Image (cartoon, rainbow, N blue to C red):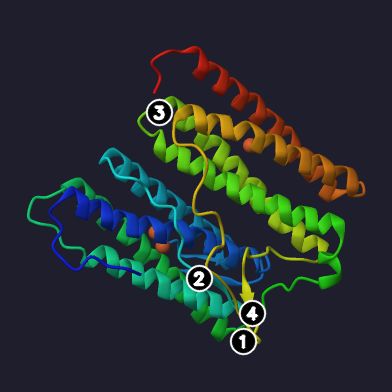
Amino acid sequence: MKKIGRIIGTAADTIKLLNIALEHEWAVSFEYLLHAYSMPKGRFFYEDPVMKQKTDARAQTIQIGIDEMYHALQLGVIITQMGGVPSFKTDEVIRYPKIIDNLKRDKATEDLVTNLYQTARFKKGAYPKVLNMILNISYDEVRHSRQFDFMIETLEKQGQAGEFCFQANPEVDRREDAALLHEIMRLENELMHRYLKYVILFSGHQDLSQRLFKNSVNHMRHWDKNAGLLVKMGSVIRIENAEKASSGEEKSLRPMPVSYPGRSRLSALKSLVPAEQNLIAKVEQLVAMVPDGEIKDELKLHLALKREHLFTQEWLLQNARMIKGLD
Ligand SMILES: [Fe+2]
Ligand SMILES: [Fe+2]
Ligand SMILES: [Fe+2]
């Protein structure tokens, strides 16, 4: 991770720091979800040091990933308000074959970013709200680090340190339905992040940004559910553009897009309609392909909500076109 080696006193330096943090938060929110979706539900419990309750490590890892998404959102909004351009580049993501190795990486990531936030030095009195925000975020990271630490320790104590992540069955992955579900996962992830980007860009217009945020969250939910469906089929979430070492470690420098279409309100809204239509077409195709049962029922629920998104997006676009002076 890059760092700013000087005392921060200008807007340009502040934006630079916030963008380093944004790129990081953007990548780790994805990486934690990837790690969580690669492990079984309700199997690895740890005693949470703050909640003082036995807690599912997978569920908490997802929750931490969502916290990181909120961090990205906060950072992006401030960068935009300060007149900067938010960066959506990502750091590399890694998935190790063993669950504990992913958790160890996640813990190291938390410590690294805590350090970035807590060592940033501002000129006396400069940007007090930004400083306050990064301190607040840094203590979320401290909490996350301790959570991962307890998960690791518990796995070790319980003799679960050798447990492996789900492995994709190559025969399942060769099937048309599994291939289509992988493609739908990719599109859900892309759209979830694309909506988030627009939430950031249009944060000055709360009506639009709240609506887009709702859609982003829905795509995140579907992505989450689909990760479970893939496991049911006998596969597991795939990392885009990943290289697999002989040790089984997968690494990708481009796990998701680094840019998204649309700079203005109209061009952003225009791009969402065909994106929603494309996703709907793929889900319809998959619904027709899978036999009656749990997977089909789940996909039909997704489809209904996606049709609602399309309705919303078509009207957001039409309404924006009708009003003059809307920038
Ligand atoms: Fe974070
Ligand atoms: Fe964190
Ligand atoms: Fe949608």
Q: Of circles 4 and 1, which is in front?
A: 4
Q: Of circles 2 and 4, which is in front?
A: 4
- Residue position for label 3: 206
- Name the foreground residue: 209 vs 229: 209
Regarding residue 49, the answer to whether it shows in the image is no
Q: Quadrant of residue 281?
A: top right
Left or right of residue 1, residue 128 in this image: left
How far apart are the alpha carbons under marks 2 and 4?
24 Å
Label 2 is placed on what type of residue?
A: Glu
Say which quadrant the N terminus sits in: bottom left
What residue do we see at 21% from left, 63% from top?
120
Where is 202 relative to 258, above or below? above
What residue do we see at 49% from left, 43% from top?
196
- Residue position for label 4: 97
Q: Position of residue 270 (x, y in %)?
A: 57, 29
Label 4 is placed on what type of residue?
A: Pro
